[in-house]
Image (tube, rainbow, N blue to C red):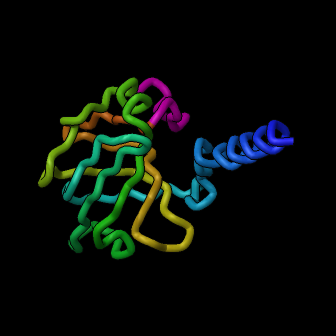
């Protein structure tokens, strides 16, 4: 009986651990909406499981008032983004940045990264997803 109980206990712990390895869905983001955020990097976190770019958007000419504030832009893992040309020195605090991202549905100041437009016009994508009109960039 002790062996059976131990087996059940081990199986229960194994099943309970499965969600810990699961990846969250993107259902919290409006993935069909692209918003452009133009501001300055406050912090760039090159960490797993998700990198983050914290940016501050100040009010000004040509700035959508809905984008003003400090935003946490969530990217992919360092492995995925590294294959797209990102690295731990891509940004530093104070860098001007233009980010296109999918905002949180609840209106909180967060978004899922789509791509960044660098000062030279080059685009760095979160992953292999590309808009059809920019498939070669």
In the image: residue 119, left or right of residue 137: left
Magenta residue span: 127-137
Figure quadrant of residue 58:
bottom left
Quadrant location, the N terminus: top right
Judge left or right: residue 111 versus residue 124.
right
Q: Which residue appears farthest toward the left when viewing the image? A: 94
The image quarter in which residue 39 lies: bottom left
Which residue, as the protein is rendered here, is positioned at the far front?
1
Q: Which one is nearer the viewer's eye here, 4 or 107?
A: 4
Q: Where in the figure is residue 26, as x and y percent of width and height? A: 59, 52
Residue 28, percent from left and from top: 58, 61
Figure check: 78 above or below 101 = above
**Residue, x 27% and y 66% (percent of image)?**
62
| Front position in the image: 132 or 110 | 110
Left or right side of 96 for 2: right
Number of dots carrying numbers: 0
Looking at the image, is 44 positioned above or below residue 134? Answer: below
Q: Going 25% across and 40% down the picture, which residue do you hit?
A: 118
- Residue 6 position by quadrant: top right
Say if the magenta span includes residue 131: yes
Image position, residue 7 (x, y; %):
79, 38
Answer whether residue 13 is magenta in the image.
Answer: no
| Residue at the image point whose x is 48% and y is 62% from the top | 103
* Residue 97 image position (x, y, % from top left): 24, 50
**Residue at the location (29% across, 41% down)?**
46
Q: Is residue 98 left or right of residue 15?
A: left
For the stretch drawn in magenta, the main secondary structure is loop
| Image quadrant where one finds the C terminus | top left
């Amino acid at each position: 009986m002790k062996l059976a109980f131990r087996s059940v206990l081990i199986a229960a712990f194994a099943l309970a651990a499965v969600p810990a390895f699961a990846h969250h869905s993107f259902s919290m983001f409006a993935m069909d909406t692209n918003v452009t955020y133009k501001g300055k990097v406050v912090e760039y976190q090159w960490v797993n499981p998700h990198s983050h770019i914290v940016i501050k958007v100040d009010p000004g000419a040509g700035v959508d008032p809905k984008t003003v504030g400090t935003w946490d832009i969530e990217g992919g893992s360092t492995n995925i983004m590294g294959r797209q040309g990102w690295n731990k020195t891509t940004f530093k605090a104070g860098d001007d940045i233009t980010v296109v991202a999918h905002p949180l549905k609840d209106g909180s100041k967060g978004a899922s990264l789509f791509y960044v437009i660098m000062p030279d016009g080059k685009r760095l994508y979160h992953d292999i997803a590309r808009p059809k009109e920019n498939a070669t960039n």
